[in-house]
Image (cartoon, rainbow, N blue to C red):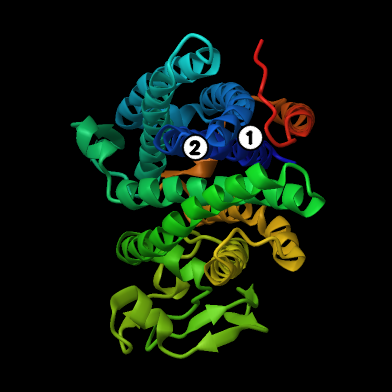
């Protein structure tokens, strides 16, 4: 494994794990806020008990997310020094603002966590509002940096170096709005389904059925609102990619040759040697419609770009299909639940539905991870699209392989410990009506 591959693998592994922690760190505060709000509005203490059971998981994922995010910051400087030297002036504002949001989130999470016996119920609820906003805003600021890497702006190139930097213009780059909104909604959907799968298992086992059904209904209510919005923002993202990242679109759709009335390719395995996609399903003209709102529009293929400047469709296309497929897996469970909920006028406890929700519960995270891989693989071989190649940015220092192996082991142990802690905590407090104790 050479230095470049080892550095990319290390960043990839770090991000794969960090995304899980960050996703739950964004989604859980929203559920806390809604549960505490329902407790205030209805006077039903069970909503407050449900919320307090989510406090420790929220604190754990926040802490681990902070640690993994710090590791990523060090990795950026150590593994990609040329990238940081090139882009620091453009993405520094986003990371600085993220720091303010992070500390705001930490303050109000601490107030909510330790304020059970010191603050009124209304004050506890009010703490969850800035907590929820700060968690989302923190992610939105960080996503600005990734958006800039995909659609760099806010500078001029002078003698091979960036000059005349406009930080606000770089911050508000073309990819940022749709990436930020789509990513935040995806975090809400992923968290909702993860929570729903856990409570579906509780209902199936008959443990704390009343409160488990309430938590199940609340989590899928959030998904019912945010999942359709993801379709809207996903279409917006596709339009932006079609306009500003044409090579990425071609790789996503495994579209090798520029053509009019381009079909949408679903599934299959792209073969760059032959320019064909084996075993795929093709829907005539649909790619032209989706990309340009015209069934006969010309869609640029990978052949429209210089050789060596385009992403590998064998990496991008399968993950794009996995992302879309994961959404439909969740959509089936969501539609099934709310159809039975409407018919029965109560939270359904049909075993087949509950087992399906358990099966579908990880697909929100799978969709998020797949979407991130599409974004990153779809930008290669560039770390800053059109300006700086990934191969030019990597550190010349050795020893990256050993660091990569060490960090894989550390992340696996960290995640296993987190899951054990959270499952043990939920198991202790899974019975109906039990209060959560805090140190």
In this view, the residue in front, 327 or 311, is 327
Residue 140, by quadrant, is: top left
Element on which disc 2 rests: helix
Q: Quadrant of residue 68?
A: top right
Is residue 438 depicted above or below 246 in this figure? above
First reached walking from the N terminus: tag 1 or tag 2: 1
Residue behind mark 2: 35
Q: Position of residue 284 (x, y in %)?
A: 46, 91
Numbered tag placed on residue 290 in the rendering: none
Marker disc for residue 14? 1
For residue 297, say whether it is visible: yes
Name above or below for residue 293 compared with residue 202: below
Residue 333 placement: quadrant? bottom right
Q: Residue at point 38% right, 75% down?
A: 300
Q: Residue at x 39, y 19 (%)?
A: 123
Q: Nearer the viewer, residue 284 or 312?
A: 284
**For the residues marked 1 and 2, what is the alpha-carbon distance in whole angstroms?**
32 Å
Query: From the viewer's perspective, is 148 left or right of 394?
Result: left
Q: How many neighbours does mark 1 have within 10 angstroms: few (below 14), some (14-19), or many (20 or more)?
A: many
Residue 44 in percent (x, y) is at 51, 36
Residue at point 61% right, 61% down? Answer: 315
């Amino acid at each position: 494994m050479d230095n470049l591959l080892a550095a990319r693998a290390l960043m990839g592994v770090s991000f794969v794990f960090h995304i899980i922690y960050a996703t739950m760190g964004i989604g859980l505060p929203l559920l806390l806020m809604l549960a505490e709000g329902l407790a205030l509005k209805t006077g039903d203490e069970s909503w407050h008990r449900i919320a307090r059971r989510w406090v420790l998981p929220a604190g754990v994922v926040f802490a681990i997310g902070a640690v993994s995010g710090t590791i990523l910051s060090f990795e950026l400087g150590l593994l990609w020094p040329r990238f940081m030297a090139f882009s620091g002036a453009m993405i520094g504002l986003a990371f600085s603002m993220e720091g303010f949001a992070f500390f705001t989130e930490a303050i109000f999470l601490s107030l909510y966590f330790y304020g059970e016996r010191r603050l009124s119920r209304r004050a506890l609820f009010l703490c969850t509002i800035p907590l929820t906003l700060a968690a989302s805003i923190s992610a939105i600021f960080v996503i600005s940096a990734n958006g800039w890497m995909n659609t760099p702006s806010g500078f001029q190139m002078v003698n091979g170096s960036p000059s005349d930097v406009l930080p606000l213009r770089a911050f508000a780059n073309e990819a940022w709005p749709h990436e930020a909104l789509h990513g935040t909604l995806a975090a809400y959907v992923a968290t909702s389904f993860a929570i729903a799968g856990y409570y579906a298992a509780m209902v199936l086992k008959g443990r704390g059925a009343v409160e488990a059904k309430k938590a199940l209904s609340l989590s899928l209510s959030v998904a019912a609102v945010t999942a359709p919005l993801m379709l809207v923002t996903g279409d917006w993202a596709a339009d932006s990619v079609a306009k500003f990242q044409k090579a990425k679109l071609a790789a996503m759709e495994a579209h090798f040759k520029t053509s009019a009335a381009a079909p949408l390719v679903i599934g299959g395995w792209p073969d760059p040697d032959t320019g064909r996609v084996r075993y795929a399903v093709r829907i005539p003209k649909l790619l032209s419609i989706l990309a340009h709102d015209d069934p006969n529009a010309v869609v640029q293929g990978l052949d429209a770009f210089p050789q060596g400047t385009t992403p590998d469709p064998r990496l991008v296309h399968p993950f794009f299909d996995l992302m879309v497929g994961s959404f439909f897996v969740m959509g089936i469970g969501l539609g099934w639940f709310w159809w039975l909920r409407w018919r029965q006028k109560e939270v359904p406890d049909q075993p087949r539905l509950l087992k399906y929700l358990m099966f579908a519960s990880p697909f929100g995270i799978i969709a998020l991870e797949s979407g991130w891989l599409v974004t990153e693989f779809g930008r290669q071989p560039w770390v800053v699209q059109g300006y700086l190649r990934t191969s030019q940015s990597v550190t010349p220092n050795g020893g990256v392989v050993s660091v990569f192996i060490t960090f894989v082991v550390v992340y696996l142990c960290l995640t296993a410990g987190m899951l054990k802690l959270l499952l043990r905590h939920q198991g202790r407090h899974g019975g109906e009506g039990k209060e959560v104790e805090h140190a």
